[in-house]
Structure formats: C-alpha cells, structure tokens
Amino acid sequence: MNQNFDEKCKSRGLSITVQRQKVYEVLMEDKSHPTVDSVYLAVCKAIPTISRATVYRTLETLADEGLIQRVLHPGSSARYDGNPAPHNHLVCTVCGKTEDCMDSSLNALPCPDRSSTGFTISECEITYRGVCPECQRKA
Ligand SMILES: [Zn+2]
Ligand SMILES: [Zn+2]
C-alpha cells in the first residue's frame, strides 16, 4: 500500500515524507471521512511530535495533488476522503457524520443540457442531507 503511495508521490514530484505516508495511511484505514482533528489524533499515535498544522498542510497537499479529496459541506468543518474519485455522500445535519452513498442508479443520472451556455460538465457529485440513525435515536 505504501509502495503505491510512494509511486503516486514520485509521479507527481512530491517528496515522500514519514508525515505524508502516515497521514495517507490513516485516511486509507479511516473510511469515516475524518476531520483534520481526527486525522491529527490518529497520526499522533505514530508520530507524537507532529503538529496539527503539519497534519492540516499535509492533507491539503495530498488533496491538491489528487491523492485524496476534500469533502466540504457548508456549515461544517472540512473532511477528507481517501477515495479521490467523484462519488456521492450522505451527510447528517446534526452530527456531521458523512457516509459514501454508492448507488448505481445515481451513476445513470443524465447531466443537464448546458449546450446553450457553453458550460462543459466534467463530473458530478450529489450530497444528500438528513439525520443519521444515531441522531434519530437521541432525538
Ligand atoms: Zn448524526
Ligand atoms: Zn466519500
């Protein structure tokens, strides 16, 4: 897995650092779309001296390079996704929990016709907002 990461870094001219390797590893293991803070806590277990700012910068660099993706929802803090391919999400408006929503019917949705405006569409992501089962139970 890390060999794969090393190759991806090399092909992008990114230097391979222990911090980058660890941050990437955490994201590969944590499928919950963690925030900077949760990635930081997990990376700290392996690299206790790392700062939150370094973890943040590392996440941003990896996202800019397309190795991971930033998941931004208005009103909640940024989350990071180890899967850089466009895909759909379910977001809980109470706790911010973010889950992948893989449903083949969504991939069959036609793109709107923008030929009159000249806008070309390259990809599409859908975010469904609602309340997760845990928050429903608490309510
Ligand atoms: Zn929730
Ligand atoms: Zn995702």
Image (tube, rainbow, N blue to C red):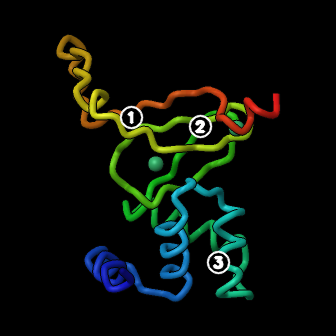
Q: Left or right? Give the position of 29 relative to 119.
A: right
**Mark 2 residue element:** loop
Residue in front for this viewpoint, 35 or 55: 35
| Residue bearing the label numbered 1 | 125
Q: Residue shown at 56%/53% (left/top)?
A: 33
**Mark 3 residue element:** helix
Distance of label 3 from label 2 (alpha carbons): 24 Å
Distance of label 1 from label 2 (alpha carbons): 12 Å
Q: Position of residue 87 (x, y in %)?
A: 37, 42
| Residue bearing the label numbered 3 | 43
Tell me if residue 133 comes above or below residue 113 in the rendering: below
Mark 3–mark 1 contact, CB under 8 Å? Answer: no
Pointer 2 residue Cβ closer than 8 Å to ligand 2 = no
The residue positioned farthest toward the top in the image shown? 116
Q: Quadrant of residue 69?
A: bottom left
Instruction: Please rate how many residues cluster around mark 1, counting C-alpha atoms within 10 Å: few if below 14, some from 14 to 19, many from 20.
Output: few
Q: Residue shown at 66%/61% (left/top)?
A: 36
Earlier in the chain: of badge 1 and badge 2, it is 2
Pointer 1 residue Cβ closer than 8 Å to ligand 2 = no
Q: Left or right? Give the position of 111 relative to 26.
A: left
| Quarter of the picture holding the C terminus | top right
Earlier in the chain: of badge 3 and badge 2, it is 3
Residue 73's disc is: 2
Residue in front for this viewpoint, 59 or 106: 106
Residue in front for this viewpoint, 105 or 44: 105
Q: Position of residue 60 (x, y in %)?
A: 53, 62
| Amino acid bearing label 2 | His
Q: Residue shown at 65%/56% (left/top)?
A: 35
| Amino acid bearing label 3 | Val
Instruction: Please rate how many residues cluster around mark 3, counting C-alpha atoms within 10 Å: few if below 14, some from 14 to 19, many from 20.
Output: many
Q: Quadrant of residue 23?
A: bottom right
Earlier in the chain: of badge 3 and badge 1, it is 3
